[in-house]
Image (cartoon, grey):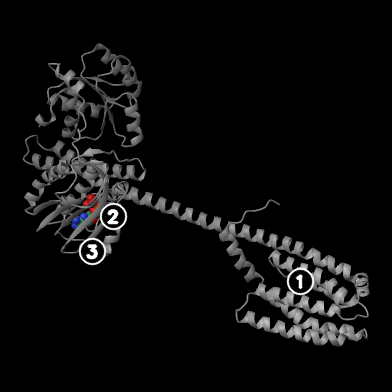
Amino acid sequence: MKNIAYAKSFERLWQSEAEAENKLYNKLFCIAFLLCNPAASIGFYLANDPFYLTLLYTHCISSSLIAVLLLLHYKKVITGQQMSFITQIMLICFYTYLLAQPHRSYAQSCLNLTLGIIFTGLILRWPVRYALASSLLSIILYPAAIYFLGEPSALKMFFAEGGVFLLLAQFLFPFVMKVSVGKDKREFYYRYNLQEQNVELEKQKTIAENATKAKSDFLSMMSHEIRTPLNGIVGIVHIMMDEDQNSKNRNELLTTLKFSSDHLMAVVNDVLDFSKINADHIQLDEFAFDPGLLFENLRKTFVPRTDEKKIDLIFDIDSRLPSHIISDSVRLNQVITNLIHNAIKFTETGYVKFVVREITRDDKTVRLHFSVEDTGIGIPVEEQPTIFESFTQVRQEDSENKGTGLGLAISKELLLLFKSDIYLESEPGKGSVFSFEIQFPYLEEEVTVKPVPLKKIMTAIAFPQAKVLVADDNKINVTLATMLLKRKNILFEVAQNGKEAYELFLQGGFNLILMDLRMPVMDGFESTALIRKIDQDIPIIALTASAFGDEKDRVHASGFTGYLTKPFIPEDFYAYIFPFLGVQTAKVS
Ligand code: ADP
C-alpha cells in the first residue's frame, strides 16, 4: 500500500486517539501479567520443579511494582502506553534474572515467555520504537544472562528447549507492531478524512442554502421595490390618457409620474451597482484629483437641499490635505454622497457635518479620516448591526424619504475596494455619525487633469449643423433619442440595424453615431468594426442596457469612442453627447 504522508496536526490527533483507544488494553496487559506471572509458578510446582519458589518470590515483587504503575496511571502521572512499556521493560529485567538461575529445564520458561510476547503483540499498540527497545533488550539480555551469570552449557539447553522460538518471536515483535499500528493509523486517517470532508460538505451545503435563500429574498424584495414605482407610472399614464388635455391635474400627475420614474431608476441603478460589486465587476479607476475641489463640488450639490430643509450644512475639511490624491474620485464621491444624502434625509433640525482629517502621512501616502455627522432621528442600537446589509430600512419611510435600502450596503462594499471599513455611532433622537478611513497615494506638485478629446470637438465645431446617426431597433428608444435630439435642433437619421447604419454612414455627413449593441441582421459591434475600417475618428457611442464591466471592456476594445448606459435622463444624455458635437456642456440647460 502506498505510504501516506501524515500532517503534523494529524499525528498529534492520532497520538491522543491511540492513547484513548488502547487505554483498556494497556490496563489489561498490566493486570494479566500482574496475575499470571505469580500464577505461572504453579506450573513449575506441579512439574515438581523446585524453581517454583524463586519464581513465586520474584513475581510477587514484579506484580507489586506493576500494581504501583497501575496506581500511577490511575493518578494520571503516566499514560497507558508508558505504563505498559515500563511494565514490559521491568519484566524483561526480572525474566533475565530468572533465566540466569539454574534450571532443570528451560521448556516451561520459554513457552511462558513466547506466549507472553504473542499476547503482547496481539493486544498492545505501541510506537515501533517501544517494541524495538523491548525486543532488543530481550534478545541481548536473555542469552547473555544465561551465558555469563549462569553456566555457559545452560545456553545450549536454553536454545534446544524453546529459546530459538522465544528469540524469533522477540525478533518478529517490532514488525508485527509496525504492521498493526500502521493499519490502525490508516483506518483512522480515512475516517478522519471522511469526517473532514463531511464537515466541508456540510459547510458548502449551508452556503448553497443561504445563497438560494438570499436569491429568493432578493427577488421578492426586488419585485416589491420595482413594482411599487412601476405601479405608479402605469396607473398615472392611464389616468392621464383618460384626462382632458387641459386638465388642472395634469401638472400634479406629471410630478408624481416623474417621482415614480426617478425612484424606479434609482432602484434599478442601485441594484445594478450592488450586483456589479458583488460579482466583482467593479474595479477602482484611479487617477490624480484635487480632494479640495471634490469636496467643494459636493458641498455645492447639497446646499439647495439643506437650505430647503433649513438645516446647517457644515464642511470641515483639514487644511493640510495634499494638493492631489490618487484614487477613484467617482466611487469616493458616491460613498460620501450616499452618507450625506442619508444624513440630510433623516435630519429635520440642527446640522449635517462632513469632516475630513489627515491622520498620518509619509513620503508617498496619506491617511484620511472621513465622518458624516447629523443631528437627526438616529438609529436604534438593535438595528445598527444589520444596517449595512442589503435592503435594510429601519423604518417605513414616507414617500419623500423613500430609498432603496441598498445605499449603505453599496457604500460598505465600495469601501472594501478602498481597503477600508465603515463605522457607525448613533443614538435614537440625537443623531448618527458614519465614519471611515482611507490610505491614499498622493502628489504635491501640479497635475494635469484628464484631457478632453480635442480633435473630435474641433471636427464637430467645423460643421454648421451637427448630424447624428441613431442606430437602434427598439422603437421607444429611437423615439426617446430622436425627441431629445430634435429639442436641441440636432439633425438625425435612424437606422434599424447595424447593416442599415453602415449603409447610411457610407452616404456621409454624420458627426456622431449612437449605436445600440444588440440589433437584428447586424449588431453594433460588427457595424462599428466596418465603420472603423473607413473612419477612425468619427465618435461612435455605444448605447446599452447592460451594466456589467465585461461588456464595457468589450465596447472599449471594439473601436467605440464611449459608452452610455440606458436608462438615462435627458441631462445625462446631453452632457454625454455634446462634447462630441463641439457644444460646451456648461452652456446647455
Ligand atoms: P436607503 O436607500 O433606504 O436610505 P440605505 O442603505 O442608505 O438605504 O440606508 C438604510 C437605512 O438606514 C435607511 O432606510 C434608514 O432607515 C437608516 N439610515 C441610514 N442613514 C441614516 C441616518 N443618517 N440617520 C438615520 N437613519 C439612517
Count of all numbered marks drawn on residues in the image: 3
For ligand 1, give the image quadrant: bottom left
Image quadrant of residue 589? Answer: top left
For label 2, the crowd category at 10 Å Cα-Cα, with few meaning under 14, some 14 to 19 and many 20 or more, is many
Q: Is residue 480 left or right of residue 22?
A: left
Q: Residue at x 63, y 61 (%)?
A: 188
Looking at the picture, which amino acid does disc 2 mark? Answer: Phe
Q: Distance between the residues labelled 3 and 1?
A: 70 Å
Disc number for residue 380: 3
Mark whose residue sits in front, 3 or 1: 1
Q: Cβ of disc 3 within 8 Å of ligand 1?
A: no
> Quick one: label 1 or label 2, which is nearer the N terminus?
1
Foreground of the two, 562 or 57: 57
Q: Which of 585 and 83 is in front in this view?
A: 83
Question: Of the residues under marks 2 and 3, which one precedes in the sequence?
Answer: 3
Residue 348 visible in image: no
The residue sitting at 7% across, 38% down in the picture is 247
Residue for badge 2: 388
Q: Which residue is drawn at 14% across and 19% down?
A: 461
State the residue position of label 1: 120
**Mark 2 secondary-structure assignment:** loop
